[in-house]
Image: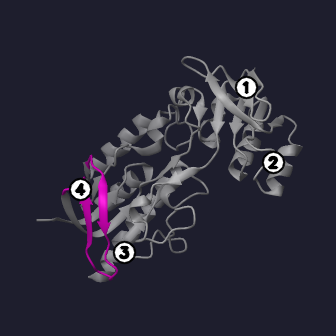
């Protein structure tokens, strides 16, 4: 027999937990399945200094634990598990069927998707080892900690150019590593980079290894044309080569843009199917901040509550 619930939340980052808090307070008795990474991307961040309400800062794992405890205090059932299949109804008032861990059947009146996005990394062993120790995929999250220091930005698109110019206001020097002999960023962003005095762009250049045992102490770079290698002393490495939204499960079911982000209706969190809502980085490729994810989680719960209210 399938378990029948009023509100199912898929994913456990700031968007999912905020949706759970609002849904629980609205007596929707939400059930959350966390996915394999409880707390989402923020649990890979050591220090969080820009989330309101933490005057002395916190770390990502502690903050997610606070949000989880708050959601549970209002009655949210937080379950460790992975949604492996979905059968969403196309009818208003229809029941959405979901399978968890390939063997647990759930029937939900509303579904809030907050599965987030995964930052792309280079895949180097030294890079992976130093994530949280100087390697980051978010300049606006972590740039503050490198005030007055020298850092690297890896990437050639608009995001990389934007992160480099942002960091240039904080750091003493920013070196951009571009794999090809040109940047993919828009001309406007390239002009901003070129006009910023403390940004240096190295073309045809890749990271061979991130140096340091516990924290980043530098990088060894390689010119992919000549094969020449050299070392640069830096304390931070910002990888800006994109994100992958965690939407594989919903392909062919929910409307997405050409990069896989879920499309929502106007300023709402409504997807193309009634009773299915999307919040957080799974539908936001512009801001990708914990506080904006939390905001859309609130919106999704309110949208779900209003949807159910209209059915009565």
- Assess whether mark 3 and mark 2 are in contact (beta carbons under 8 angstroms): no
| Mark 2: secondary structure | loop
Q: Is residue 134 shown left or right of residue 262?
A: right
Which residue is denoted by mark 3 in the rendering? Answer: 306
| Mark 4: secondary structure | loop
Q: Residues within 10 Å of mark 4 (few under 14, many from 20)?
A: few
Q: Is residue 173 shown left or right of residue 146?
A: right
Which callout, 2 or 3, points to the residue nearer the camera?
2
Q: Residues within 10 Å of mark 2 (few under 14, many from 20)?
A: few
Residue 243's spot in the image, x, y percent? 56, 50
Q: Residue 50 or 177: which is nearer the viewer?
A: 177
Above/below status of 19 relative to 210? below
- Write the residue at 37% across / 70% down: 276
Q: Residue 24 or 268: which is nearer the viewer?
A: 268
Q: Is residue 91 magenta?
A: yes
Distance of mark 4 from mark 1, alpha carbons?
Answer: 48 Å
Which residue is denoted by mark 2 in the rendering? Answer: 182
- Write the residue at 48% across / 60% down: 296
Q: Which residues are magenta?
A: 79-103
Q: Earlier in the sequence, mark 1 or mark 2?
A: 1
From this viewpoint, is residue 117 visible?
A: yes
Q: Which mark is residue 149?
A: 1
Which quadrant is home to the C terminus?
bottom left
Q: Residues within 10 Å of mark 1 (few under 14, many from 20)?
A: some
Residue 147's spot in the image, x, y percent? 70, 29
Distance of mark 1 from mark 3, alpha carbons?
Answer: 49 Å
| Mark 3: secondary structure | helix
Which residue is denoted by mark 4 in the rendering? Answer: 102
Q: Earlier in the sequence, mark 1 or mark 3?
A: 1
- Write the residue at 63% across / 46% down: 241
Colouring style: one colour
Q: Earlier in the sequence, mark 2 or mark 3?
A: 2
């Amino acid at each position: 027999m399938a378990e029948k619930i009023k509100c199912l939340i898929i994913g456990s980052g700031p968007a999912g937990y905020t949706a759970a808090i609002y849904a629980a307070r609205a007596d929707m008795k939400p059930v959350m399945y966390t996915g394999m990474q409880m707390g989402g991307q923020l649990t890979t961040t050591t220090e969080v200094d820009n989330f309101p309400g933490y005057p002395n800062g916190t770390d990502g794992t502690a903050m997610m634990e606070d949000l989880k405890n708050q959601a549970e205090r209002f009655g949210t059932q937080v379950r460790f598990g992975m949604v492996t299949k979905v059968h969403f109804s196309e009818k208003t008032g229809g029941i959405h069927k979901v399978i968890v861990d390939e063997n647990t059947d759930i029937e939900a009146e509303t579904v809030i998707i907050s599965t987030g996005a995964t930052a792309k990394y280079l895949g180097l062993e030294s890079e992976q080892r130093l994530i949280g120790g100087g390697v980051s995929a978010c300049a606006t999250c972590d740039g503050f900690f490198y005030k007055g220091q020298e850092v690297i930005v890896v990437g050639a698109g608009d995001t990389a150019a934007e992160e480099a110019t942002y960091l240039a206001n904080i750091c003493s020097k920013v070196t951009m590593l571009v794999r090809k002999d040109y940047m993919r960023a828009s001309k406007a962003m390239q002009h901003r980079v070129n006009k910023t005095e403390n940004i240096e762009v190295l073309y045809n250049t890749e990271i061979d290894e991130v140096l340091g045992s516990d924290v980043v102490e530098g990088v060894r770079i390689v010119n992919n044309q000549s094969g020449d290698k050299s070392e640069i002393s830096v304390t931070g490495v910002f990888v800006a080569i994109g994100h992958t939204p965690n939407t594989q499960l919903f392909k062919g079911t929910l409307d997405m843009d050409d990069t896989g982000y879920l499309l929502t209706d106007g300023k709402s969190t409504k997807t193309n199917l009634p009773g299915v809502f999307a919040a957080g980085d799974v539908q936001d490729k512009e801001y990708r901040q914990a506080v904006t994810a939390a905001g859309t989680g609130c919106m999704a719960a309110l949208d779900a509550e209003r949807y159910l209210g209209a059915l009565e």
